[in-house]
Amino acid sequence: MSTVASGRALPPASGAWREGDPPGRRRWVTLPGTLPLEAGGALPGVRIAYETWGTLAPDASNAVLVLHALTGDSHVAGPAGPGHPTAGWWDALVGPGAALDTRRWFVVAPNVLGGCQGSTGPASPRPGGAGRWGPDFPLVTPRDQAAAEARLADALGIGRWAAVIGGSMGGMRALEWAVGLPERTGALLVLACGAAASAEQIAWGAVQTAAVRADPGWRAGRYHDAPDGAGPHRGLGVARRIAQLTYRSEPELADRFGRRAQPGEDPWRGGRYAVESYLDHHAGKLVRRFDAGSYVTLVEAMNAHDVGRGRGGAAAALARARMPAVVAGIGSDRLYPPAQQAELAALLPGADRPRILDSPSGHDGFLTETEQVGAVLREVLGRG
């Protein structure tokens, strides 16, 4: 049980799922052998957590792969509860009669390699019982993560997905599926993503990882067995505050918060503005359900995103992906602006114009605008 200070439980050193925690809806596959990595070397003992909805057809023709973003996980649909700190991040889009209609589709959502909600990552025990991976966890790229997901598909008996769907970091992996494994990708939906990480996106990521590493509780990445309140939660909270500003739009923040003070507080006397309280809220939630090492690992994976690397550039790489494709963005997204989706749509042979969602919510629109996202989901599933 967590130590309590000032009436509130201290945050854990890591919010990662650990052995002995309730499994929730998760299942696991341990990948055979080792997983070769793009940067060199290989990762042994990889285990991937995943969840499913619906029933797999006898010929496995109705399987759809859904890939989560940076701080998401396999829990796409369903309530919060034991084993699941938050409700499903696309809860309205998966189920009978929903856009991902589980009467027809078998939906599979893995927790990404390097993540912290059941899949192998920095918080995981090292094979052979030599403690946790911690800072020794290697650099992984979206290409490596897609390779791990391909082995999961093998284990599930799925030779070809009816569709591969992903937003933000999930979109990076979806692109790797489409380019690296086109014969296994029946249709493609990429949301709020580009062909490669831009200089600005890398810079935002670098600032966030620097905030985590600057926390004394980081302990060079060896903090996982620290007591409650002694981990790098302050640095992870700062990283989340920075990220949250890139996920939302300035007009939305102005409309929701303006210059208003947080009720009952005076910013001139040590209190907070309402927008500061909003950032504090999101930071406080994340540090209780996420792992700082996974955050660093996944941000660095996103910074490594370049679908054209080693393939003759983005245009040559994307030309391989000839399956039906839909590319969608959010008009107010300042982190992955619509010009990046326009480039993808122009280079993917199976795509036409990008679908630009109307939302004040910025990058987070791919999570919040469920009606519009549902429409593009139905469109891509009708094309496969």
Image (cartoon, rainbow, N blue to C red):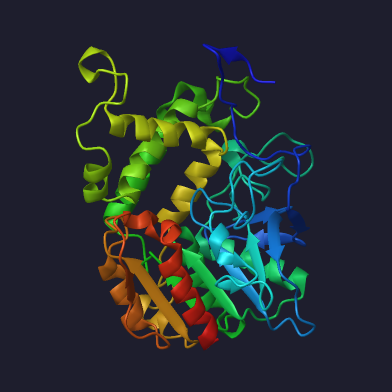
| 68 in relation to 12, above or below | below
Q: Residue 362, percent across and down? A: 31, 55
Q: Is residue 210 visible?
A: no
Q: Eyeballing the image, is 103 above or below 78?
A: below
The spot of residue 248 in percent (x, y) is 32, 49
Of the pair 206 and 167, the residue shown nearer to us = 167
| Residue found 44% across the figure and 55% down from its top | 302
Q: Residue at x 45, y 75 (%)?
A: 375
Q: Residue at x 64, y 49 (%)?
A: 79
Q: Nearer the viewer, residue 130 or 341?
A: 341
Q: Quadrant of residue 146?
A: bottom right
Residue 122 lies left or right of residue 248; in this view the side is right
Left or right: where 199 falls relative to 96: left
Q: Front-most of 40 and 366? A: 366
Q: Is residue 39 visible?
A: yes
At which x and y percent is residue 23?
Answer: 75, 46
Q: Residue at x 43, y 88 (%)?
A: 350
Q: In the image, 188: left or right of 199?
A: right
Rendered-image quadrant of the C terminus: bottom right
> Residue 383 at x, y = what percent?
51, 87
Q: Quadrant of residue 28?
A: bottom right
